Amino acid sequence: MTRSLAGKTVVLGVSASIAAYKAAYLLRLLMKEGADVYVVMSENAGRFVQPLTFEGLSGHPVAAEVFDTAETASMEHIEKAGRADALVIAPATAGTLGKLACGLAGDALANFFLAWKGPVVIAPAMNDDMYAHPAVQENIARLKARGAHFVDPEEGELACGRVGSGRLAEPAGIVAAVRSALQPAGDLEGLRFLVTAGPTREPIDPVRFISNPSSGKMGYAIAGQAQRRGAQVTLVSGPTPLDAPEGVRLLSCLRAEEMNTLVQAHLDDCDVLVMTSAVGDFSVETVEKEKIKKNGDAPLRLTLKPTRDILREVARRKTHQFVVGFAAETENLIDSAKEKLQKKDLDLIVGNDISAPGIGFQSDSNQVVVIDRAGRVEPWPLLTKRQIADRLLDRILQARRA
């Protein structure tokens, strides 16, 4: 197994939340990825999980007090931690976010944050009303403006018994955010990416069309992260309300045929093609020039024909391009994805079960499997689409270098 954080040192900041118990599991996951982990705690975090727990798991003294007379080595370990690669604060309470945003010291975690100069990953956890409060959102906005990476809380059952948004993100997602924060900004420099995103629309008449609920979020996330990491990116997008990521060339289209034309026109100029778009499989054989009138209770019958298979066209023409496809399925996910991988001569395919609640179309998160040419299946945990984008870009780089 690839240890993606091997050789890295991570400082784990823990604040006073019932979710602090998840920080112990997060610590183990970080270490499993190869990281050396130091723990710094806020003033009352030890009321939920004792510092001794983190000390036993990490193998390092824990900084839990500003003036630590019992452990003389604590200042030495804080100095070592200050030379770490990343700081991740999970859970981050409303009180801790306020301290960090306003530059207030007073406990070991706040003091450490004020002296920290490296990348920061913050995972909030609190009551849903607290999380939605304007003051908390303003503090989050301040920290984001200063460069902090946030792992948004999930919706679910909270400690107070309510159901809402405020539950600490799953540790696997937080690890992915740490990995993303540490990703070299220019590792894709020199590569040309062609990314497709969003749905297509096939007209029935001047006011009606056939489409699907794809939001385009996955493709836009991949395009944005590839550009951020140094790639030259062209994004071919069906209709979505999303703004093109900064620095990305956007080519808009509506119909599957229009998307195919744009992809084929730019295929020769790309090194990597990532087809996340939900291209409609069928179009109407005859598009009416005038709006179809309703005729009482009489049914409307449409004759549909298959649209052009863009990936099949790509398979016929590609030369050096690395091609990634996506498969949105409702059953037999892995078998269907493997079949598509082989039929369309793909280098990688990303599959997800769109029948699963809370993921896929329109969602900000997804849970996918990645399958390579050799048929190896990699199930990924529930992640945000931005985290999936970075992890997929890592996987593309790894495969191209093999």
Image (cartoon, rainbow, N blue to C red):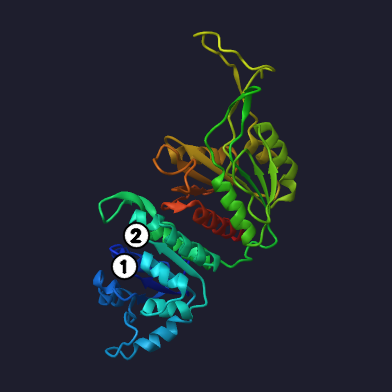
- The mark nearer the N terminus, 1 or 2, is 1
- Amino acid marked by disc 2: Met
Give the CA distance from mark 1 to mark 2: 18 Å
Residue 229 sits in quarter: bottom right
Q: Which mark is residue 147?
A: none
The image shows residue 179, relative to residue 241, as above or below, that is below
Q: Quadrant of the N terminus?
A: bottom left
Residue 178, x across and y down, in percent: 47, 65
**Element under disc 2:** loop
- Amino acid marked by disc 1: Ala
* Front in this rendered view, residue 267 or 132: 132
Answer yes or no: is residue 59 visible.
yes
The image shows residue 323, relative to residue 229, as above or below, that is above
Please report the residue visible at 65 percent of the width from the left and 33 percent of the height from the top: 256
Q: Nearer the viewer, mark 1 or mark 2?
A: 2
Please report the residue visible at 55 percent of the width from the left and 40 percent of the height from the top: 342
Give the side of residue 390 with respect to residue 18, left or right. right
Residue 62, x across and y down, in percent: 33, 80
* Front in this rendered view, residue 95 or 17: 95
Name the residue beneath numbered marker 1.
Answer: 24
* Front in this rendered view, residue 330 or 334: 330
Give the side of residue 164 with respect to residue 266, left or right. left
Please report the residue visible at 34 percent of the width from the left and 59 percent of the height from the top: 126
Q: Which mark is residue 126?
A: 2
* Front in this rendered view, residue 61 or 143: 143
Q: Residues within 10 Å of mark 1 (few under 14, many from 20)?
A: some
Q: Residues within 10 Å of mark 2 (few under 14, many from 20)?
A: many
Please report the residue visible at 58 percent of the width from the left and 55 percent of the height from the top: 396
**Element under disc 1:** helix
Give the side of residue 255 with respect to residue 334, left or right. right
Residue 4, x across and y down, in percent: 48, 66
